[in-house]
Amino acid sequence: MVKLMLALDLDKERALKVAEEVKDYVDAIKVGYPLVLSSSLEIVKEIKDICEKEVILDFKVADIPATNEKIAKLSLRYGDGIIVHGFVGEDSVKAVRDVAKPLNKKTILVTEMSHPGALRFIQPIANELAIMAKKLELDGIVAPSTRPERLRELKHLSNLPVLTPGVGAQGGRLEEIIKILDENDYIIIGRAIYNSEDPKKMAKYYKEKIRALSK
Ligand code: NUP
């Protein structure tokens, strides 16, 4: 079954509350700058203490190789993997991968982003990014639920597990993307769950919908 990854872009207090509420229905958790900058990287441990899920660091690392290496070393003291940008070049991505691999942690490459602004600069190179992810034998790519045909193509080109954001608040439709995905892939949902009146109920709703549509 396709996995559900919760994006926890909240402050510490709300993030821990939501993690506790939804833990029976999500398979993994994604933390990014809003949460880490409003607390610290230690938050990853606190989340793991609550729910023992896979935690991916969405830091979209995009610097020169020497700096990427330092960022990866510091970040990957926590969590199970890190998201990087590829437009900075193969050497920068390799620097992260070479830190992550020996630690048994994932390096996940952003290909095409899910927001409208992605059309101008990143969509034109997204196919090449997916091919680079495959060549570097990374652990996954990020590709958009907001453009199902692009999601299909990027998954095909990379032949890697896909983490796909865009369902819910960004207008992506679960029914349209689920047929493209398989049990190695993750659907990332944030606001549609944590901003709802009842995050637990909403996480259950998405989990059950994924189960029903996966058949
Ligand atoms: O292309 C991307 N789009 C995107 O929304 C790459 C991402 N990493 N994200 C992240 O996915 C975004 O930063 C947020 O954490 C999550 C989507 O959350 P939501 O739109 O479901 O609230």
Image: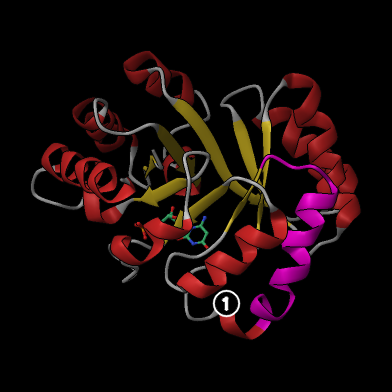
- Residue at image position (38%, 56%) is 178
- Residue at the front extreme, as displayed: 215
Q: Is residue 182 magenta?
A: no
- Amino acid type at mark 1: Ala
Per the rendered image, the range of residues in magenta is: 121-139
> Could you tell whether 133 is left or right of 7 in the image?
right
Nearer the observer, 91 or 144: 144
Indicate yes or no whether the magenta region holds residue 132. Answer: yes
Image coordinates of residue 29 in percent, x first then y, are: 42, 35
Is residue 118 depicted above or below 176 in this figure? below
The correct choice, above or below, for 192 with respect to 96 in the image is below
The residue that label 1 is drawn on is 118
Whether residue 117 appears in this view of the structure is: yes
Left/right placement of residue 189 relative to residue 87 reads: left
Q: Circle 1 — which element?
A: helix
Tell me which image quadrant ligand 1 sits in: bottom left
Q: Nearer the viewer, residue 149 or 55?
A: 149
Assign the magenta stretch its main secondary structure: helix
- Tell me the quarter of the picture where residue 143 sits: bottom right
Q: Is residue 112 visible?
A: no
Give the quarter of the image for residue 11: top left
Camera-side residue: 84 or 130? 130
Viewer-proximal residue, 150 or 65?
Answer: 150
Residue 140: percent from left, percent from top: 64, 45
The residue sitting at 74% across, 75% down in the picture is 125
